Amino acid sequence: MTKVASRKGHMTLPVEVGQEEVVLDLYQRWQADALRDSDGTSMPDSLAKQDSDIYSVMCLVRGDQAYANQHPEYLHRKYLMSFPVTAMEESASISPLSGYSKDKYELDDDSDPKQWWEVRDRTTNQVIDTQQWDFEPDTKSVVIRNTTPYHEYTVTFMARQVWDSVSMYNALTNDWDGPRIKSLDPYHPECRAHLIRHFQKWLDEHPHTTVVRFTTFAFLFVIDTGEKNQDIYRDWTGYGETVSPRALQDFEQRFGYKLSPEDFVDAGYYNGTYKVPSQRYRDWMTFVQEFVVDFAGELVSMAHKAGKKTAMFQGDHWIGTEPFLESYQKIGLDINIGAVEDGVALRRLTDSCGKQTREARFYPYFFPDVFREGNDPVVESMSNWTKIRRAMLQKPLDRIGYGGYLSLANKFPHFIDHVADISQEFGDYLNHTQRSESQKLPGKVAVLSAWGKARSWLQNQARDQRFYVPPRPDVMEFVGNNLLECLSGLPFDVEFISFEDIQENGISDDIKVIINTGDANSAWSGGECWDKPDVLVALRQFVANGGGLLGVSDPSAWQKNGRYFQLGDIFGLEKETALTMGRVAMPVSADKSHYLSQFVCGNEDFGNLSYVYPQADDLSVIAAEGQHLALTAREYGEGRAVYLSNLPFTMNNARLLQHILVWLGSNETCQHAWLSENPYVDVAYYPETKAATAVNFSDEPQTIRVTDLQGQEVTLTLAPYEWQWVS
Amino acid sequence: MTKVASRKGHMTLPVEVGQEEVVLDLYQRWQADALRDSDGTSMPDSLAKQDSDIYSVMCLVRGDQAYANQHPEYLHRKYLMSFPVTAMEESASISPLSGYSKDKYELDDDSDPKQWWEVRDRTTNQVIDTQQWDFEPDTKSVVIRNTTPYHEYTVTFMARQVWDSVSMYNALTNDWDGPRIKSLDPYHPECRAHLIRHFQKWLDEHPHTTVVRFTTFAFLFVIDTGEKNQDIYRDWTGYGETVSPRALQDFEQRFGYKLSPEDFVDAGYYNGTYKVPSQRYRDWMTFVQEFVVDFAGELVSMAHKAGKKTAMFQGDHWIGTEPFLESYQKIGLDINIGAVEDGVALRRLTDSCGKQTREARFYPYFFPDVFREGNDPVVESMSNWTKIRRAMLQKPLDRIGYGGYLSLANKFPHFIDHVADISQEFGDYLNHTQRSESQKLPGKVAVLSAWGKARSWLQNQARDQRFYVPPRPDVMEFVGNNLLECLSGLPFDVEFISFEDIQENGISDDIKVIINTGDANSAWSGGECWDKPDVLVALRQFVANGGGLLGVSDPSAWQKNGRYFQLGDIFGLEKETALTMGRVAMPVSADKSHYLSQFVCGNEDFGNLSYVYPQADDLSVIAAEGQHLALTAREYGEGRAVYLSNLPFTMNNARLLQHILVWLGSNETCQHAWLSENPYVDVAYYPETKAATAVNFSDEPQTIRVTDLQGQEVTLTLAPYEWQWVS
C-alpha cells in the first residue's frame, strides 16, 4: 500500500501557465501537497520542479491524434439502431444514420453489413434475412424488399465515432475551438502496441511527474448524439461503446456463443444501467473488464517501473475499471480519484475495497459555466460540502482536490476563502480520525438490486428525473426518490447485494436489514429478478427469522401469480396497476401508537402518490397521502417490514430513515452512544482515536443531546454549518 | 314495438301506502302517467285501480323465501379464493372462509371438494395434487401436506351465499331489520320450474299491474364480503356469481372443454370487468347469457300472455341481460329502465339497439341517506340533471321516474318543486323533439377497448378512483380520467368497438375518429390486445389514410419490441416506465401556432402527470405540465393523432374534446350549424322537428353565438341553468 499524503498537506491543486504566483499562495492557504494539470491546462515548468506531488493527466486513447487520423479502423465503434421506419408499401429504404450526428458518426465501412448488421421487423420482432435487403454504398442506405406495409423496420449498424464525446461536449458547451479529438480503441493489438510505445515515450518525457493521473483507460461512457449534435441518450456506466468485430469474434471464442447486434441495441433500450441486465450483456461486461484490466495493468506497471505512482479519475470514462469490481485490484493503481458532488458520490469513492488512497475531486470544476460574473460558486460548493461531510463521517477519505482553470477561481476571493475553510475542516477531520472508521449501529444494512456490489453507491434515479431539465446537463441534480443520499450519512454498515448473491449464497448472517428501492422495471427494484421463487423464499425466511425489510417506491414489483409486489405478503399491501380496481378502498387511519409514529411530524417529503393500498388487517399506517400509503410498518414472523412510497433527500427524511432502520433492526430499545436524533446534525464517534464529532447541516444554530459511551448525556451547541470535535 | 307513454304524462311516480293524497297531487304536478312500488314499499289498493300504468316490482329469485330456505342446494354459489397462507413448515392448514363473511357465505357441502375445489402453490402457481390435501369437515379446513416452506398456498372453494348482497346492504347500510333474504339460482331445472309456477301465481294475483318491472332475472352482481361484513370486492357487471357444478358440467358439454376454479378466481383478480377478458371467461359469459336470455324470455312471454307489459331495471343485477348484447332483443322486453346519475349512464340507457321504451330512473333515490335533516337533496339532483340534460340532447329518452319512499321526499317541498321543474323541462324536450335524434357532426367516433360494444358506455374508471372514498358507497362519484362523460353530451355519433372487431372486420368506412382511453393493463386501454401486429397495422393504415386517433392516459400501452405505447410511432411520444431513463429530456415548448392551441386557455384539467415525453421531431405540444406532456397533436400520413394525459369531466374539458374530435376528423375548416363553442352551453338541432335548443350547464348567465342552417349568426342569452328552445 502506498499513501501519497506523506507531506503536510492533503489537497491537489490545479495549476495553469501564467498563474504561478497564485499557485504558490494557494498552495499554503489551501494546504496543498500536490499539483495537477487539467484538461485544457498544462503544468508550468517552474512548478513542475516544486517539492510536491506532480499529477499529470494521461488520457492515452486520445493521446496521439496523428495516429488516430491515420487509422480510422482503430477508432471506437458502436452498434446503433436506426430510428424505426414504417414501410408504407412493399419495400422500404432506411438511411441508418438518419437522426444521428454526422459530425460524430460515420458508417463503419470496415465491417461488412451483411455480416455485422441486422435488419428487423420491429412490429413482429423478426430478423429479416440478409437475402431480403442490401446496403447501397452510394446512398448510404439499406433497401428492404418484401416488407409488410405498416410494419416498422430498423437497421442495427456499426458506427465509427470520429469525434470523441468529451471533446464534442467541450466544443459545443464550453466553446473550445481546438481540433475534433478522436479516441482509439486499444482492443486492436496493433493499436495497443502503438499506444504502449506512445505511453513509454510520454513517461520518458515527464521526469517531474510523480503521479500519472489516468482518465480513461480504454473505452468511453455512452453518449448518443442526435443530428443537431444534441445528446439523445446517456449512460455514464454503459458498455455500448466497446464494440468491434474483432472483440465480438474473440468473445465468441471465450464464451462459446455469439452475440448479435440486438444484444447491444436491445430494441432501442441499449442495456441502460437502470435496466435489469441480461446474462448475455453481463458476459459482455465481463469480457470487456478482462481486457481493460489487462491493458490498464500494463500501463500501471510501466508507470511503476518509471518510478511513478498511478491514479485513476473515476469521474469520466471508467468502463471496465469500476473499483467495486473484484478485478479492479489486479490493475495495481495507487490512488482512486472520484468526482464527488454529494454523499452518494463520496461513498462510491470511499466504500470500495482495496488499499488505494481515496481522493475526492470536488465540484464546482473551475470552468466558465460556474465561474462567471453574477454567479456565486460558493452556493453550489456549500450545498455539496454539507452533503459530503455527512458521508465523510462514515468512511475515511484521504485527500481532496479541485480541477479546472485556477485563473477563473481566483476571480472569486470569497470562493478562495471558502475553499481554505473546507481544506481546514478536512485537515481537522484527518487529524481527529487518523483515517479510522466511525462506530456503526449493530447489524449490516444490505441494499438489494439486480446489480448488487458491481453498482454499489450508484444513483438509482427515479422516473421523475427524466422530466427534470437541470440548468447544467453535466451536473446531476437529483429529484424524486433518493434513499441512497439519505443513507450515505447514517451510521450503518452498508453493503450492496444482488439477487444472484441470494440465490447462490443465501443471506449472510451479519445482514440485519435489507432494502429494496427503485421504480418498477428498473435494475434497482429488480424487475424480472423477482420472478424467482427461491429469492422470495429466502427473503420471507429472512424476515420471519427476525430480519428487517425496507421497501421503497416499487419494492419487489413484478406482475405474477396475483401480486404486483411479490413480497406484498410481508409488507401487507399492494399497488394498484388497474388490475384490482374492484377491491374496495377503505379509509386508511394512522396508527398513532406505533413506535415510528413519534418520528413523523408532518413535514416529511414522501414524494409522489404511491397508488399503494393496505392488503392486511395488521398493517400499521404511519403516514398516508389521502388513501395512498406513504409509510407503513408490519411485523412478519419474528421480523419487521416497512414500506415507504418515496424518500427524496432531505435531512428530515434522512433522520427518519435512521429511525426506520433502527426499528427494522430491532435496535430501538437499546441506548446508542453518539447517535443523533436532531434532523440537521450528524454525529459520529471514532473508537480508534476516541474522538466524537457533530456537524451541522443547516444554516441555523442547532443544539443536540446525545449520550456518550458511559451513557452520560452530552449537550452540544453548533453554529450554522459548524463542524465540531469533542475529545 | 310498444310505447307506454300513450297518456299525457311521462313520469313514473313511486307510491307508498299512507301517501295516497300526496301521490294524487304529485301525479299532476310531476306529470306522471305511471305508478310504481319500490323495494320496501307497496302499492296502495286505492291507487292500483287508477287510470295509469301500474309498475310492479318483480325480483323472482328473491320471491319465495320459504322455498329458498328449504333448498340450500339451489342457492347462488360462487368460487372464492381463500386468502393466501404462507407455509411456515412442511404442512399448512387453510380455513377457506377465513377473512370472509360468515353471515353471507357457507362452504357449499353439495359439491365434493376433491372434484370442485383447487389448491394452488401461489409462489409457483402450481396446482397441488388432490392426493396431497384433504378437507376436514370438522374444522372446515383444508390440510396440505409436503408444502414448501415460505411458499404461499390458496384453496379455491365453492361457497354458498346465504344472504343476498342487496338485502345485506339494506340491512347494514339502511338499518332494515327484515329477514335475511336468500336468492335462488334458476339454472337448476327444478328450481326454475318452481319459480315459473311462482311467477304465474303472482301474475294471477296482480290483475291491476300493467307493467311487470323485473329487477334481476337470474344472477347477482359481484360483491365479495369480508369477515366484518364489509364489502371487499365489487364488480357491478361481473359474472362471478353464476357458478354451479351443474352449469359447469353443461358448459363442458356446450364448449367442449372444462373450466377450472382458477378460471373464476383468476389469481384473486376475479375477472374484474376492468380487466382484459380471457377467451375462456368470455365463453362462460356467452354460456350464462344464453341461459339468462332463455329464462328471461320465458318470464316475459308469460307476462305478455297475461296482458302485461314488461320492463327491466338495469340498475341492479343485469348479468346476462345487458342491453348492448345482441341476444338481449330475444328476451322481448318492452321497457328498459336505467338508473341514471350522469350523461354516461343516460347514454348507456339510450344508445342500445332495440325498440324498447327508455325510462331513466333518476337519483337521488328517496332514501334516508339523502332525504335526512340538514341535507339538501336538490344539490345532488341538480348536479346530475345538468349532466343528464347534455346527454339527452344526443339520443332520445322516452320517460323519467323516481324510486323510494315518497313520504321522505315530501318532507322537502323545495325538492318537490325542483322535480316539477325537471319534469316540465323533460315534457318540453319531448314536445320539441318528438323522440327524434339531433344532428351530428360528420363521421363516426369509435371508442376502442377490449370489450367493444358489449360494454358500451360503461365507465372506465381510472386508478385514482381506487383511492377515493366516496361518502356513499353505492353512488358513483367519479375522479380522474372521464372522457366518456365529456363525450356523452357532444354531437358525435359514437360507437364502441373491440380489437376483435378490427381483426375480424377491419375498420368500418364510416368511422372517422378512433379513441383509446384508459389506464395501462385495463380492458379500456386494451392490455395484451395490443400484442397483435394486425391490429397495429389496421390502425396505422386507418390514420395514414386520413383517420383520426385520440389516445388518453395509456393508449396502446403494452411493453413489447422497444415500445410501451405500441402506437407511439403515430402519436410521436413514449411513456417513461423506467426503461428509457437514459433518453435525454429536452425542454418541451408549446406550439402556439397549432389549430388546437387556440382552445387551450390554461384552466383545463389534464389530471395527473403523464410521464410521457416527445419521441418525434414533428410533434406539436399543445399543453404540458413541466416536461410531462398533457396534450399533443401530430400528423401521420393523411391522418392525425392527439394524445391527452387525462380528461376528467369538466365542461371546459368537454368542449376541448369537441374541438379535438373536430380536428381529428379534419372538420375544422367547415362551418357547422348549431355547434356550440361556449364551454358551458350545449346546443343541438333536430332536423325532424326543425327545433334548436341550448342548455346552460352553469349557475351563471351565458351568451352564445351559433350559426343556423343558413349560416346566419344567432345570439342566444341564457339564464343560469336555463334550457331554451328555438323554433
Image (cartoon, coloured by chain):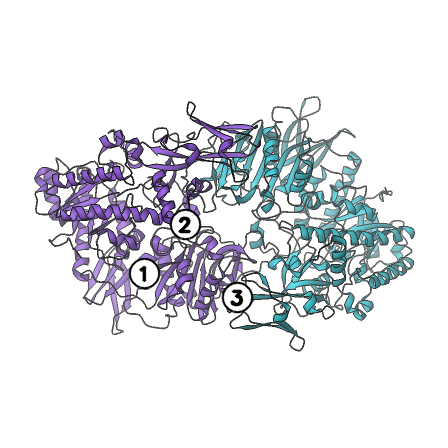
Chain colours: A purple, B cyan
Label whose residue precedes the other's in the sequence (2 or 1): 2
Q: CA distance from mark 3 to mark 1?
A: 35 Å
Report helix, strand or loop for mark 3: loop
| Crowdedness near tag 1: few (<14), some (14–19) or many (≥20) residues, C-alpha within 10 Å | many
Against B649, residue A549 (above or below) is below
Residue corresponding to mark 1: A490
Can see residue B590?
yes
Provide the chain ID for the residue under circle 2.
A
Do the CB atoms of the residues marked 2 and 1 lie less than 8 Å apart? no
Where's residue B384, x and y in %? 67, 46
Residue corresponding to mark 2: A480
| Crowdedness near tag 3: few (<14), some (14–19) or many (≥20) residues, C-alpha within 10 Å | many
Q: CA distance from mark 3 to mark 2?
A: 34 Å
Provide the chain ID for the residue under circle 3.
B
Residue corresponding to mark 3: B151
Can see residue A600?
no
Q: Quadrant of the C terminus of chain A?
A: bottom left
Provide the chain ID for the residue under circle 1.
A
Same chain, labels 3 and 2: no
A489 left or right, relative to A87 = left
Q: Amino acid at mark 2?
A: Gly
Same chain, labels 2 and 1: yes
Where's residue B181, x and y in %? 76, 66
**Which quadrant of the figure has residue A353?**
bottom left
Question: Foreground mark, 3 or 1?
Answer: 3
| Crowdedness near tag 2: few (<14), some (14–19) or many (≥20) residues, C-alpha within 10 Å | some
Q: Front-most of A105 and A118?
A: A118
Q: Front-most of A710 and B567?
A: B567
A145 left or right, relative to B76 = left
Do the CB atoms of the residues marked 3 and 1 lie less than 8 Å apart? no
